[in-house]
Amino acid sequence: MEYTCRVCGEKTECEPLEAREMMYGTRERFHYFECEKCHCMQIVEIPDNLGDYYGRNYYSYQTVEEHAQEEPKTSDERPVLDVGCGSGAFLMKLYQIGMRNLTGCDPFVPQEIEYSNGIKIFKKSIHEMEGQYDFIFMKDSFEHVTDPNEVMESAKRLLSDQGTLNIAVPVYPNIAFDEFGADWYQLDAPRHICIYSRQAMEYLAMAHGLQIVGVEYDSDYGQIIRSFLYSKGVPFWEQTMDIVERYFDKQTIRELSDTSKMANEKGYGDHAQFYLRHREKV
């Protein structure tokens, strides 16, 4: 079969990988392929009813509670945008460390939210947002978008001249996929549309006038444990500590932590933070 990459436009002929929906455990099957040029792993066909695969208890849409606490001694008024923010848990953490000009956007939240501390969340896509932001975050949201080039262009438009774009995403290839293949839990079919390689991220940055100024791999032992449990047929929402301890003792978990740390050091963990800025003009 021949497929066209959503990132670089390259055509690839290959046999697709079949992955199961395992967050909720429906086990519905979806096909993925790897672009032979930029190595982005991506879903072959996006479901028309993609929104139906985000249940009411999807983790990023759970209610965020405001807690009264001591005000930080300093405050930072630089504008921040969190794209795909859900109910605003990450924005709340930024508020707790002194950030004050905080905005989020997510087209899938039930309604717009304005917290008493001033955090505003708009029921909008990044394409509908206006303004300039010194920090733009996409914390595990970029892999969900169906139009990565358009999203990157909108991020560039919204990023101030000296601003920083932080994209945190699952990455491919990695040690977990090497071991578990289609049971690698970060495939997260069909919610994860594209699982980017470093080459794919570099392509997107260059194509949209940005440059990657830093990469930090930050996966942990969960990449192995969750994938292993998927291979045993245990869905994400059933992976309790009792289930984990049935297969992994404390010593094994420590060893998996060390393995993940070494994989990160080699740029081969399954999750990374990419830091981008406007490309310097020569």
Image: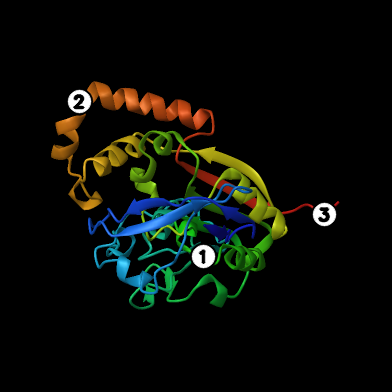
Q: Amino acid under label 3?
A: Lys
Relative placement, left or right, of 277 versus 94 is right
Using a 10 Å C-alpha cutoff, classify the residue at mark 2 as few (fewer than 14 neighbours), some (14 to 19) or many (20 or more). Answer: few
Using a 10 Å C-alpha cutoff, classify the residue at mark 1 as few (fewer than 14 neighbours), some (14 to 19) or many (20 or more). Answer: some
Number of the front mark, 3 or 2: 2
Reading the image, the residue beneath label 2 is 249
Q: Amino acid under label 1?
A: Asn
Number of the front mark, 3 or 1: 3
Residue beneath the point at 39% across and 69% down: 47
Reading the image, the residue beneath label 3 is 281
Residue beneath the point at 55% across and 77% down: 128
Q: How far is the residue under mark 1 from the one under mark 2?
A: 44 Å
Q: How far is the residue under mark 3 from the one under mark 2?
A: 53 Å
State the count of labels: 3
Where is residue 42 drawn, in percent x and y? 49, 55
The answer to whether residue 124 is above or below residue 281 is: below
Looking at the rendering, which quadrant does residue 207 occupy?
Answer: bottom right
Residue beneath the point at 42% across and 63% down: 85
Question: What element does badge 2 sit on?
Answer: loop
Where is residue 200 drawn, in percent x and y? 60, 50
Residue farthest toward the right in the current orientation of the protein: 282
Residue farthest toward the front in the current orientation of the protein: 1
The answer to whether residue 262 is above or below residue 147 is: above
The answer to whether residue 31 is above or below residue 266 is: below
Question: What element does badge 3 sit on?
Answer: loop
Foreground residue among 231 and 205: 231
Question: What element does badge 1 sit on?
Answer: loop
The answer to whether residue 60 is above or below residue 52 is: above
Reading the image, the residue beneath label 1 is 101
Q: Earlier in the sequence, mark 1 or mark 2?
A: 1
Q: Earlier in the sequence, mark 3 or mark 2?
A: 2
